Image (cartoon, coloured by chain):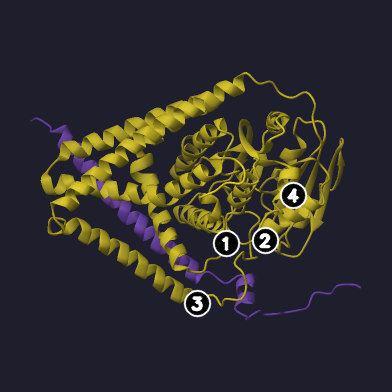
Amino acid sequence: MRFDWVNILATVIFVSIVVTLILAVASYFAYKVREARRPKTAAELRQEGQVKVFFNEYKPK
Amino acid sequence: MSANENAPNEAEPKPIGKRPLRPTTQLIISIAIIALVVMATFFLFRYPQRLGPIFITALVVTLASFLLLLVLRHFILIWFSYLHQRELACEDCEDVYPFVSIIVPAYNEAEVIHASISSLLELRYPYYEIIAVDDGSTDDTHARMREFEGNHYGVRVSVYRKENSGKADTLNYGIHRSKAPIVICMDSDSRLTPDALRYAIRHFRDPNVGAVAGNVKVINRHNIWTKLQALEYIEGLNIVRKAQAFWRSVNVIPGPIGIFRRMAIEGTGGYDSDTFAEDFDMTVKILADGWKIHYEPKAVAYTEAPEELLDIIKQRYRWSRGILQALRKQKHLLTRSSGNVTTPLSLWYMIFEGLVWPAMNIFSSLFFVWIALIYGMTKLLVMWWLLLTILDLLVAAHAILMEREDMGLAIYAVFYRIFYVLIIDVTKVFATLEELVGLDMSWGKLARKGRI
């Protein structure tokens, strides 16, 4: 049986590109979801005017 | 660009005033952008015949030009980086050493700050001081910094703590407290090699050199992601810097190791907090003032690269948007330069690399797959892949040999373009679209593994 290396290689390249592109878009989507679900930082809360103050820092005069 | 996310933190660079969108709204807009791009790509390749033969000819010509440009780009980079290397080989290390201040900004870096400052105390350089600034960390960073406070065989370590205000402001705070004519700005998760300073300083013999970019390498080469990034730093980033250094106009001084003439940094008014790429922003300002920027391959800083795909995407998303923000801010320099004539060229090159190149790369990958599918031209697909892979292998081998790096990394060049670069380019395209739409973004922070 004779292997057609060009076709085999082309199939591998084709599958790689398609899978990589799908992985890239899916990962980007996953990243956005993770960022949206991440707890907000103090600075973000400050920006939104929702700062939760548990105590005021004591600063000696 | 900085390889890490260290100091930046909770302090956001965006001007306060505009109310940020809710995360869910941002997510919906992002999904809409993703869907739009995927659909547009699908229709473009699904119904090309309807667009007429002119469209197809234009497509073929564009992509052939892209391939030609790619080959040309690689050869130009190799040629100029070789010239730069040859030039450096003729130079000796300076035997007069100016006093140097090393600024270490840190925000919640308790895992790595000890190793970072320890590496600085091992530098083979006679006159320097370390200024460590804690940017209001909420972990043990400050306590760990304090362990080093004082004199260490002639090297003074000063530790400061201030309210959280972001990396740019923290660097300015440190620079303001230094008196040295040469200032090194670094990241707290970086580790300098003992001779880094000695080699970098020699370039300041030229009074027109305002800054020197160091050589950043990945320290944590544990998995495929970090190995690909290690290769990217050697092949993709450093070779570009070497080629640009031949013209003394390096366009990004990396965050992990940037050596500045104090006069140059003061002339720019210091770091600005209004972009997510303060290192690129500073570089452009220095170039615009007419200073030359050099690159020293022996001034090595090891940095911890993100180990997971989502963290890499997060880092590159920030880099892409930060560069676009800085370019938008300095857009007047695209058409004129108050200093070097190479400055506008450098900026246009950044636009090309940041905007045009990623889109073209994705587009050409899809195009060749489409050609193979529709017309059964599998040979073309194989030839295209073979050409790019041979090109990448050659460039990788050249870059690795020049840096005396691990030759085993060269094998990753086989997956480099078809896999890694494609993922990064997709992130860049989405980041660009989101920046154009004007979505809010936050710096966030990468989880440190303490590998340095």
The C terminus of chain B sits in image quarter: top right
Q: Amino acid at mark 3?
A: Arg
Cα distance in 3D space between marks 1 and 3: 16 Å
Cα distance in 3D space between marks 4 and 1: 26 Å
On the same chain, marks 1 and 3? The answer is yes
Per the image, the residue denoted by label 3 is: B22
Chain B painted colour: yellow
Q: Is residue B143 above or below residue B15?
A: above
Cα distance in 3D space between marks 2 and 4: 19 Å
Determine the residue positioned at 54% across, 32% down: B242
Q: For marks 2 and 4, give the one nearer the viewer.
A: 4
Per the image, the residue denoted by label 4 is: B266
Cα distance in 3D space between marks 3 and 2: 22 Å
> Quick check: B319 left or right of B420?
right
Subunit that carries the residue with mark 3: B
Per the image, the residue denoted by label 1 is: B443
Q: Position of residue A31 (x, y in %)?
A: 44, 62
Cα distance in 3D space between marks 1 and 2: 10 Å
On the same chain, marks 4 and 3? The answer is yes
Q: Give the SS element for disc 3.
A: loop
> Quick check: B259 left or right of B247?
right
Q: Give the SS element for disc 1.
A: loop
Q: Give the SS element for disc 2.
A: loop
Q: Which chain is purple?
A: A
Q: Earlier in the sequence, mark 4 or mark 3?
A: 3
Mark 1–mark 2 contact, CB under 8 Å?
A: yes
Subunit that carries the residue with mark 2: B
Subunit that carries the residue with mark 1: B
Query: Callout 4: few (<14), some (14-19), or many (20+) C-alpha neighbours within 10 Å?
Result: some
Determine the residue positioned at 74% across, 54% down: B172
